[in-house]
Image: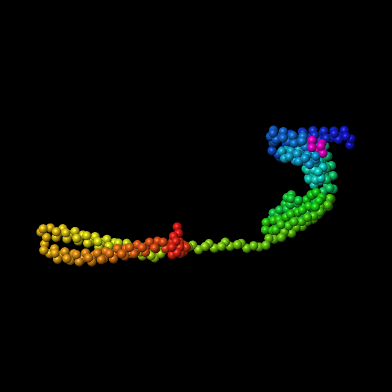
């Protein structure tokens, strides 16, 4: 092909890309005006990068434009750039899609060009047939970090010729890795056996610590009972004495007091002395009960630490 004919071909391709930039596949969402403008700009930059020999950048820009909206001409451009950067497997997939889409859109020139890419890429790619043992529901398989669709397990999977790394795992199984050298035009069969994970019994949670019961010192109720009872007795005896003295004074301290008041006075004095002793004893018991109840308050608590601290002369709050 002469330089003039090559320029003419590039011109036709550029026109097709520009026209395709506003063509939207029926299944895709309608792009906005801003998206169409951005897509056109990406395509122009991709064409410029291609003309400058920067095929990696051209492919990246074209892929970004295709994410907005794909067309037959853009699919052809991407397939050509994938071939240029040494990705025959990706170029084969793009070119085969281009051939099918060109038939639908009746783009004969693009169909012929993409079919030529298909014919050129097929001898350059390698194939993997990956099977998983045992058969599990949803294994996760990657080839050089790229996920393999479940539908392609056991089928021919196109890869670029190179040393490829296959990683597989599944729930309940360990991970297995395998490397294989993919040779152009050949099919490599890889069977991966997933190792089952060892059974690990569930760890039982440690039993909760026993709840520490509330300790009620017997000194508290006993001391309180003694203090209250003794206080009531002392109060009652004291008040009865006061009442008897008041009654005696009302009757025997008047001028017309009966002669029996003298004997009654001696009897009352003896009775009051006895009552005083009872009141003193009751007050002593009440004081003792109060002291015992106070100690019982400090001995009563939820922890043995508090009781031990009390006996050591410490007070915990």
Q: Residue 230 placed where, x, y %?
A: 30, 63
In the figure, 257 relative to 160: above or below?
Answer: below
Q: Residue at x 67, y 56 (%)?
A: 171
- Tell me which residue sits at (84%, 48%) in the image: 123
Relative side of 264 to 16, left or right: left
On the rendered structure, is 80 left or right of 241?
Answer: right
The mark total stands at 0
In the image, farthest residue toward the right: 2
Image vertical order of residue 296 relative to residue 108, above or below: below
| Of 104 and 228, the residue lying toward us | 228
Q: Is residue 52 magenta?
A: yes
- Magenta span main SS: helix
Q: Is residue 292 above or below residue 109?
A: below
Which corner quadrant holds the N terminus? top right
Q: Residue 187 at what x, y percent from top left?
A: 82, 53
| Stretch in magenta | 48-53
Image coordinates for residue 166, horizontal then vertical, percent: 76, 54
Q: Quadrant location of residue 82?
A: top right
Q: Residue at x 69, y 33 (%)?
A: 33
* Furthest residue in direction front, as rendered: 313
Q: Please report the residue visible at 16 percent of the width from the left and 59 percent of the height from the top.
A: 249
Residue 185, percent from left and from top: 84, 50
Q: Quadrant of residue 177?
A: bottom right
Q: Is residue 165 visible?
A: yes
Q: Nearer the viewer, residue 245 or 114?
A: 245
Residue 105 visible, this angle = no
Q: Is residue 112 above or below residue 207?
A: above
Q: Nearer the viewer, residue 118 or 304?
A: 304
Q: How is the image coloured?
A: rainbow
Locate the C terminus by quadrant.
bottom left
């Amino acid at each position: 092909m002469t330089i003039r004919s090559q320029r003419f071909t590039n011109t036709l391709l550029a026109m097709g890309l520009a026209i395709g930039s506003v063509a939207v596949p029926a299944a895709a969402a309608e792009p906005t005006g801003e998206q169409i403008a951005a897509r056109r700009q990406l395509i122009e930059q991709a064409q410029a990068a291609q003309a400058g020999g920067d095929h990696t950048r051209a492919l990246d820009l074209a892929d970004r434009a295709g994410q907005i909206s794909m067309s037959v001409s853009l699919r052809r451009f991407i397939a050509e750039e994938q071939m240029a950067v040494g990705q025959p497997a990706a170029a084969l997939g793009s070119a085969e899609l281009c051939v099918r889409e060109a038939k639908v859109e009746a783009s004969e020139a693009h169909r012929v060009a993409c079919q030529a890419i298909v014919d050129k890429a097929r001898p350059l790619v390698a194939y993997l047939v990956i099977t998983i043992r045992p058969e599990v529901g949803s294994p996760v398989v990657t080839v050089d970090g790229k996920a393999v669709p479940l539908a392609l397990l056991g089928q021919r999977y196109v890869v670029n010729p190179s040393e490829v790394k296959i990683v597989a795992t599944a729930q309940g199984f360990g991970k297995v890795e395998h490397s294989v050298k993919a040779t152009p035009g050949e099919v490599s069969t890889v069977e991966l056996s997933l190792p089952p994970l060892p059974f690990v019994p569930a760890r039982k949670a440690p039993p909760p610590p026993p709840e520490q019961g509330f300790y009620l010192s017997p000194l508290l109720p006993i001391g309180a009972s003694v203090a209250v009872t003794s206080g009531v007795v002392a109060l009652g005896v004291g008040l009865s004495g006061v009442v008897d003295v008041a009654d005696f004074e009302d009757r025997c301290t008047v001028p017309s007091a009966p002669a029996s008041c003298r004997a009654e006075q001696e009897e009352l004095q003896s009775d009051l002395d006895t009552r005083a002793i009872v009141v003193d004893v009751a007050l002593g018991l009440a004081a003792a009960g109060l002291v015992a109840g106070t100690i019982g308050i400090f001995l009563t608590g939820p922890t043995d630490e508090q009781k031990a601290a009390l006996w050591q002369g410490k007070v915990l709050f």
